[in-house]
Image: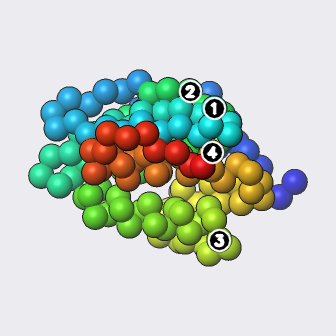
């Protein structure tokens, strides 16, 4: 097994077993959105505390497979302290990383999720939290779906 693949699996398992910012409901300016992947049954609510255009806190609630949970966990860690514009740019970089062979070095440790590309059916699992975060930034009321 390659070192990168082993790292991918270790990070996914760690963030699935011990998700960061799970069930964390930030106070203050709270924006949220609900996401659902009907193919897999993944369902999350992303909560963001945005103050003066900066994400002060991020969390998620719900249930999903290992990949969707790990992706949401990694995402919330990465978002804290970012501006809304930086969060949108990070979404674009992550979407490119997960759906193409582009190696988006700007995503830092999130690059570990690139291993999902080896499993095309699981890309929707990995992108659910990211699409839901975009809706949360807009404070949209409708459910986000990866279908």
Identify residue for label 2.
63
Question: Residue 127: in sight, yes or no?
Answer: yes
Provide the secondary structure element on which disc 2 rests. Answer: strand
Q: Residues within 10 Å of mark 2 (few under 14, many from 20)?
A: some
- Give the alpha-carbon distance from disc 1 to disc 4, as whole Å: 9 Å
- Give the alpha-carbon distance from disc 3 to disc 2, as whole Å: 27 Å
Q: In the figure, 19 relative to 10: above or below?
A: above
Q: Residues within 10 Å of mark 3 (few under 14, many from 20)?
A: few
Q: Residue at x 71, y 60 (%)?
A: 117
Q: Earlier in the sequence, mark 2 or mark 1?
A: 1
Q: Residue at x 41, y 24 (%)?
A: 23
Q: Residues within 10 Å of mark 1 (few under 14, many from 20)?
A: few
Q: Are marks 2 and 1 in contact (CB under 8 Å)?
A: yes
Q: Quadrant of residue 113?
A: bottom right
Q: Nearer the viewer, residue 27 or 64?
A: 64
Identify residue for label 4.
125
Q: Position of residue 53 (x, y in %)?
A: 17, 55
Provide the secondary structure element on which disc 3 rests. Answer: loop
Q: In the figure, 122 relative to 93: above or below?
A: above
Identify residue for label 1.
41
- Give the alpha-carbon distance from disc 2 to disc 1, as whole Å: 8 Å
Provide the secondary structure element on which disc 1 rests. Answer: loop
Identify residue for label 3.
100
Q: Residue at x 66, y 53 (%)?
A: 123
- Give the alpha-carbon distance from disc 2 to disc 4, as whole Å: 11 Å
Q: Position of residue 39 (x, y in %)?
A: 68, 40
Looking at the image, how many numbered discs can be counted on the residues?
4
Q: Are marks 4 and 3 in contact (CB under 8 Å)?
A: no
């Amino acid at each position: 097994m390659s070192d990168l693949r082993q790292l991918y699996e270790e990070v996914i398992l760690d963030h699935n077993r011990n998700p960061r910012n799970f069930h964390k409901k930030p106070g203050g300016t709270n924006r949220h959105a609900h996401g659902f992947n009907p193919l897999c049954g993944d369902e999350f609510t992303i909560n963001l505390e945005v103050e003066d255009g900066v994400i002060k806190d991020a969390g998620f609630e719900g249930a999903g497979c290992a990949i969707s949970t790990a992706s949401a966990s990694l995402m919330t860690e990465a978002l804290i302290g970012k501006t809304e514009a930086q969060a949108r740019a990070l979404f674009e970089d992550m979407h490119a990383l997960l759906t193409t062979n582009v190696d988006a070095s700007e995503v830092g440790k999130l690059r570990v999720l690139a291993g999902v590309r080896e499993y095309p059916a699981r890309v929707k699992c990995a992108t659910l939290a990211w699409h839901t975060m975009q809706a949360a930034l807009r404070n949209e009321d409708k459910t986000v779906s990866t279908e």
